[in-house]
């Protein structure tokens, strides 16, 4: 009963973010950004924090600080372009909130090396980055620092892509352990994944499992129309669908996964009226007689329609960079105040609040 009452009165807080390792792409958009904007506008949240994770980006880009620095502003522009509203959400820079580092340091005592080694996302990224024999310690422990980022704001909700699920699980373990050892202090978060399963992990234009800044297989939110078209027209499809009359596969075919993620019924009436909906288009492709070029042209129309207003808004904000910097400054100040309050509670619970 006590727990129920507590949950009911608990503040609803969002913490989410991105690494400034490049501009944001359409995988981020359908996997997380779109959901954030929806939640932001739902009116159901007391506080929303959106973090540009520069310190985390440095864990595997230590020798490239200029790249990280440049992309802080690029990511902020992408946020504003998709409709993150600074009046409703605090956009902040991770390294401007040093309390997060101190929290990470304390949480490190609660996690074992073997538990970090078992984290499937860390495992996959170590392989992808060829870190096998030389993993930077900072990179290896980033799930712990991510737990600090989330718990510093007492976040209840983390809208993110599927690759973040193991991070949230590990964060919940840290919360349990901390509360069990030091007394009820931290709040357990919940991940919110996109509702559309095609958006959980959008593949790259090369057909690789994940569109990722580090893999160079992205369509960026800031891409110009010609670039978008070029990327779509050269996308990987079903390699066995050689002639138009051949039957094609839609499962695992990135062009159809993108259509699952982006197309809406009204797009058919507007751009491809000979089909009623995506199911009809898929059925035709599967039985043969439908060429890749036609499907790609349709996908191009759909994506151009979706990305045009985002690009326009981004260009408007690009003319107002001093305001963007001010937004980050204000957001970071608010975030630091919140994190400092949690850190004070953490220190008290850990009995290291001496004076
Ligand atoms: P990096 O390669 O530097 O790790 P990234 O492209 O993986 O970059 P992140 O900043 O690590 O991007 O991820 C930010 C958010 O976007 C996370 O919530 C992640 O789950 C989500 N995300 C990233 N890529 C995709 C994708 N291809 N499909 C769906 N969601 C994604
Ligand atoms: Mg990533």
Image (cartoon, helix red, strand yellow):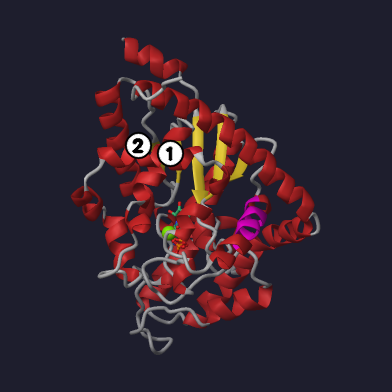
Residue at image point 63% right, 51% down: 79
Query: Ligand 1 falls in which quarter?
Result: bottom left
Image disc number at residue 102: 1
Asked if residue 74 is among those painted magenta in the image, a careful observer would answer yes
Viewer-proximal residue among 41 and 188: 188
Say which residue label 2 marks: 106
Other residues around mark 2 within 10 Å, as few (<14) / some (14–19) / many (≥20):
some
Residue 187 seen in the current view: yes
Q: Secondary structure at mark 1?
A: helix
Question: Could you give the CA–CA distance between mark 1 and mark 2, rounded to whole angstroms?
Answer: 7 Å
Marks 1 and 2 in Cβ contact (< 8 Å) = yes
Image disc number at residue 164: none
> Which secondary structure type mostly characterizes the magenta part of the structure?
helix
Residue 276 seen in the current view: no
Q: Which residues are magenta?
A: 71-79
Residue at image point 57% right, 72% down: 298
């Amino acid at each position: 009963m006590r727990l129920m009452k507590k949950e009911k009165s608990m503040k609803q807080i969002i913490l989410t973010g991105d690494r400034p390792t490049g501009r944001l792409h359409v995988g981020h958009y359908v996997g997380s950004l779109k959901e954030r904007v929806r939640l932001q506008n739902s009116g159901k949240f007391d506080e929303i924090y959106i973090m540009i994770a520069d310190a985390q980006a440095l864990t595997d880009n230590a020798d490239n600080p200029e790249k990280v620095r440049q992309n802080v502003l690029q990511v902020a522009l992408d946020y504003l372009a998709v409709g993150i509203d600074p009046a409703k959400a605090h956009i902040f820079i991770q390294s401007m909130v040093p309390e997060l580092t101190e929290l990470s340091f304390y949480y490190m005592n609660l996690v074992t090396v073997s538990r970090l080694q078992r984290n499937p996302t860390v495992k996959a990224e170590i392989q992808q980055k060829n870190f096998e024999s030389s993993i930077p310690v900072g990179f290896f422990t980033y799930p712990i620092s991510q737990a600090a980022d989330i718990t510093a704001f007492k976040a209840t909700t983390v809208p993110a892509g599927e690759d973040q699920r193991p991070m949230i699980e590990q964060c919940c373990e840290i919360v349990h352990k901390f509360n069990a050892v030091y007394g009820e202090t931290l709040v357990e978060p919940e991940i919110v994944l996109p509702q559309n399963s095609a958006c959980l992990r959008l593949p790259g234009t090369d057909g690789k499992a994940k569109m990722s800044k580090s893999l160079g297989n992205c369509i960026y939110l800031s891409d110009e129309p010609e670039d978008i078209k070029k990327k779509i027209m050269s996308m990987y499809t079903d390699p066995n669908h050689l002639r138009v009359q051949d039957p094609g596969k839609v499962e695992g075919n990135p062009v159809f996964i993108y259509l699952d993620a982006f197309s809406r019924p009204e797009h058919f009436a507007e751009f491809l009226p000979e089909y009623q909906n995506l199911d009809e288009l898929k059925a035709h492709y599967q039985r043969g007689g439908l060429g890749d070029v036609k499907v790609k042209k349709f996908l191009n129309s759909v994506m151009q329609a979706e990305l045009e207003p985002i690009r326009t808004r981004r260009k408007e904000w690009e003319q107002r960079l001093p305001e963007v910097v001010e937004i980050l400054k204000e957001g970071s100040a608010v975030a630091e105040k919140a994190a400092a309050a949690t850190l004070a509670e953490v220190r008290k619970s850990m009995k290291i609040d001496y004076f």
